Amino acid sequence: MNILLAGSGGREHALAWKLAQSRLVSGGAGTLYATPGNPGIARHAELVTLDLTDHAAVVAFCEEKRIGLVVIGPEAPLVDGLADSLRAKLFPVFGPSAQAAQLEGSKGFTKDLCERTGIPTAGYVRTRSLEEAQAALARFTAPYVLKADGLAAGKGVVIAETRAEAEEALADMFGGAFGEAGAEVVIEEFMVGEEASFFAITDGATIVPFGSAQDHKRVGEGDTGPNTGGMGAYSPAPVLTPTLEAEVIQRIIGPTVHAMTNEGMPYSGVLYAGLMLTAEGPKLIEYNCRFGDPECQVLMMRLEDDLGELLLACAENRLASLPSPRFSSDTALTVVMAAEGYPGTPKKGGAIGGIDAAEATGANVFHAGTALAADGRLVANGGRVLNVTARGANVTEAQAAAYTAVDALSFPEGFCRRDIGWREVAREQATG
Ligand code: AMP
Ligand code: GLY
């Protein structure tokens, strides 16, 4: 079978690495195509140039190459309805419809769904004008949580310590700081607790747990400094105990999937729940309609089954016929190497060397933002550049293995945090 993978980041490199091992394409059974891909993905897939916003062009490619499965990595084409355009032509797609992708594409949509179905989450109001939002602030106490309703590349959330800061942030949001995404703003109660992520694969009827992870969003060590797309992650997240996982499925994921199906917009794909583990139990912070980046990299390192078979079964609404996916009990941990300047303006073109040496230690180096220069050298071409990913018996060992690989790399114009996994490493040391 031929498979098309859409996307170009570290998440897609991890998916390509795992898909290339699938019975569906390995040993000459088929071809894995990726668009637009990156130099790391090119090791596992044939790269093609397609404009993902031009649905007719993507459909034409799938017809020409007789694609049997399309896997869509990022949220933007999902929210834009690429899966719908492909399904209309009967191509099996891993990823939700535009209607179902509203779970990520509209914070207000998700909050309303939680309210209708009694899913635990922070109290909220949806506001559609600056006046309405300023007035609504009176119903909350500091810190104020303000969210642009739409997709804002992970930058649409402001936590304001004072009322004055909140008023200023609201003025920015309604003033167009996030474009259309900020035409509506959700104001929420502030929740206290530890954050964790949980993943489930669903075809709208069957729900398959797909593991947990924790990431580090701040750029600086000790979780300080500006927010980023994620500087590192590990899986599983021991804080999400089997009891808590069962509660998350029963009280959050299950009711969401069933409500979406009952309301005529079945969710198909991976549902990624960002959770706050509060004193009253796990509460939903937000949903994403795709794998996390870099959380996907650590999940793929632990998955022991055929990813192609699983995603195809999801796309064909027959998840119930498959055994639950198996994961290694090992921990996988990934360290993000970023270009100087990130999360501001990252420096492009920095030379990268030593990937073979890093992988010789047993790690996988996934490409997130790389390019080949005119002379064929590998260079940085984005904020997050490489994801150095390793396994170990626990977080302490996985962390040591990942940094051994990091130290074998050469990327003078890049940097990474040296403390990915610190919270769990401290807990492991405390319990001996
Ligand atoms: P989101 O994009 O919705 O995941 O929000 C980004 C980050 O803001 C989350 O990872 C949390 O750290 C924080 N956050 C979002 N909503 C809340 C909330 N209601 N209470 C506390 N922190 C929040
Ligand atoms: N690492 C967070 C995300 O993918 O949204």
Image (tube, helix red, strand yellow):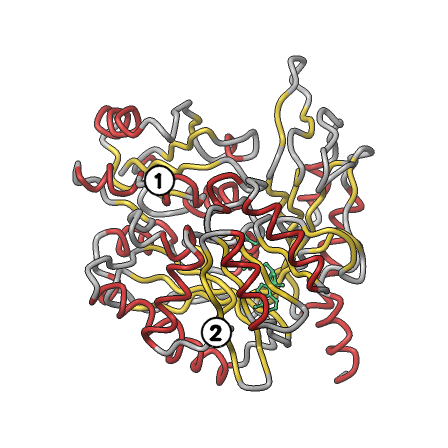
Under 8 Å from ligand 1: the CB of mark 2? Answer: yes
Q: Are marks 2 and 1 in contact (CB under 8 Å)?
A: no
Crowding at dot 2, Cα within 10 Å, few <14 / some 14-19 / many 20+, comes out as many
The picture quadrant where one finds residue 365 is: top right
The picture quadrant where one finds residue 80 is: top left
On the rendered structure, is 255 left or right of 345?
left
The three-letter amino acid code for the residue at tag 2 is: Thr
Q: Earlier in the sequence, mark 2 or mark 1?
A: 1
The three-letter amino acid code for the residue at tag 1 is: Asp
On the rendered structure, is 160 left or right of 62?
right
Relative depth, front residue between 343 and 427: 343
SS category of the residue bearing label 1: loop
Q: Which residue is mark 2?
A: 121
Relative depth, front residue between 310 and 102: 102
Residue at horizontal 59%, vertical 72%?
140
Q: Quadrant of the C terminus?
A: bottom right
